[in-house]
Image: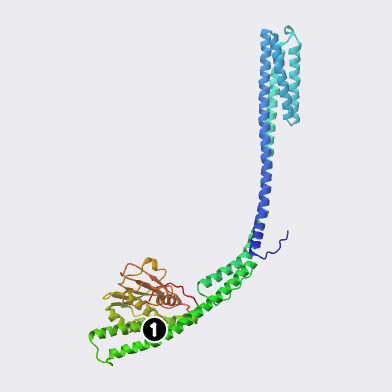
Amino acid sequence: MIFPRPRSLSGLVLLGLALIALPLVAALVTGAVQMRRLAEASELIVAEGVQGTRLTQDLFAQSTLLERQLRLYQVLGDAKIVEAYATLDSRLADIEEQLRRQMRSDQAHSQVNQHQALREDISARMLGTPQGQLAFDALLADFSKLQQIADRIYEQNNTQIDAGVAQLRTRTQRAQQQMFWGFALLLPLTIAAIVTFSLRLGRPLRQIDRAISELGSGSFLRPIRISGPVDLERLGRQLEWLRMRLLELAEDRNRFLRHMSHELKTPLANIREGTELLMDGAVGKLENSQREVTGILRENGIRLQRMIENLLSFSAWQTSSVGVELSQFRLRPLIKQIIENQQLALLAQRVRLEVNVEDLTLNADRGKMRLILENLLSNAVKYTPRSGTIFIRARADGSDLLLEVGDTGPGIPAEERKQVFDAFYTGKAPSGNVKGTGIGLSVVMEFVAAHQGCIDIVDGEWPGAHFRIRMPLEPQSLAKTETPPRIPERRAHAA
């Protein structure tokens, strides 16, 4: 049978189900027919066996009754006994006739005929001869022979039952063999149908799955092409349209971020310049309270400028190829420089630092490591209360760097920990702090992953947030990587 090639997904599914189901249905129908025939044969054997056993038992019973009537007649000589004997003899004749129809072998028929001939001879002498002339001893001896013939008839019935059971067993074994070979022949056909159907349908489904995964991860570089049934090809075209639309939206978003960040930098630069003039006393000497307010303005201006620069950098990270440029450098001087750059924010918050950094030499991207540390420290400063403590610790753990940054702030709630590394998710900022852009920790996670490392949030050692980074000191095969355009999810922690 040649099936037409289906063009739609529903047609392909129906064809696949047909190819899989038809052989199995055929095997099941054949098996059902065989089972029905065996059931009918077993019912016939049981019915014949029960009927034959009942007739042989009746044969024994009636023969015994006839013999008893003969003995009574020998003693009493009553004519009514002869009438009863004639009635019983007629019943025995009916039983013989039924046995003749029941038995199938010639030997069984011969035994029934012998039983009938001997019974008729006994009955003829019993019914046709006066009592005084009957040879009762000869008649009783013939009844003994009649019982022996009945025993042989019983054995023939059992032999017939055994033969029927043996025949049924043979038919059952033959049916089992037929079903086994039928299934053995159908199994390769079914497997071939399943494999063909899976290959025909599995390939476009895998293509769709890969395309959706790439779209979900924010990768829009690879065109989406689906080959298969018409329905799936149409779905592939829709996914390609979605990819292009998302790519356009990503470009529009990044363009908007660049333009807005650029527009914000100009007035912010003026604000910073004004606060610097005030701090320098260019417009007159400031009182202590005025200088404190001016210092707060300058600090928050610096923070806003850093946020804008992060937005610009983030836009660049998301739209251009970002390579991991490896170089060897010492970690301790880098951390010292970052702390000095954020000294004003630390003094304003009156935050104490506990730094325990081993003098390690890394083979990593210095710029990315700087941004990782800056964002983690900035995040800790924001969420650490006044007179609190920030902990920075770095040490070698085998061939890995173990870098930890913690604080004594409120910590990160368990329900937010799955979101803090997603871009543009902003947690609740402490009072008095400017709410962040929500990209700092997202950048940290991406750069740690670019160094074949991982970042986790741990509990137990410090009361506030505790970030732990593990990454190789000497990456084995860290080539220059490219980060494709992405659409950040609208979630993540503020930094």
Front residue (pair 241, 409): 241
How crowded is the residue under tag 1: few (<14 C-alpha within 10 Å), some, or many (20+)?
some
Q: How many labels does the image show?
A: 1
Front residue (pair 362, 469): 469
Q: Position of residue 30 (x, y in %)?
A: 68, 48
Tell me which corner region of the image, top left, top right, bottom left or bottom right, holds residue 160. Answer: top right
Q: Where is residue 331 in the image (x, y as percent from the top left)?
A: 36, 81
Instruction: Give the color scheme: rainbow, by chain, secondary structure or one colour.
Output: rainbow
Q: Which amino acid, by three-letter code, is at mark 1?
A: Phe
Q: Residue furthest left?
A: 288
Q: Is residue 67 above or below residue 460?
A: above
Q: Measuring 43% from the left and 86% from the top, which residue is drawn there?
A: 263
Q: Which residue lies furthest to the top in this view?
A: 132
Identify the secondary structure beneath mark 1.
strand
Q: Measuring 66% from the left and 36% from the top, which residue is drawn there?
A: 43
Q: Is residue 313 left or right of 10 when viewed as pictured? A: left
Q: Is residue 294 left or right of 489 when viewed as pictured? A: left
Tell me which corner region of the image, top left, top right, bottom left or bottom right, holds residue 109. Answer: top right
Q: Which residue lies furthest to the bottom in this view?
A: 282
Q: Position of residue 363 (x, y in %)?
A: 42, 81
Can residue 480 be seen in this snapshot? no
Q: Position of residue 356 (x, y in %)?
A: 31, 77
Q: Quadrant of the C terminus?
A: bottom left
Circle 1 residue: 329
Can residue 47 be seen in this snapshot? yes
Tell me which corner region of the image, top left, top right, bottom left or bottom right, holds residue 335. Answer: bottom left
Q: Is residue 380 above or below residue 72?
A: below
Q: Is residue 25 above or below residue 477?
A: above
Q: In which quarter of the image is the N terminus?
A: bottom right
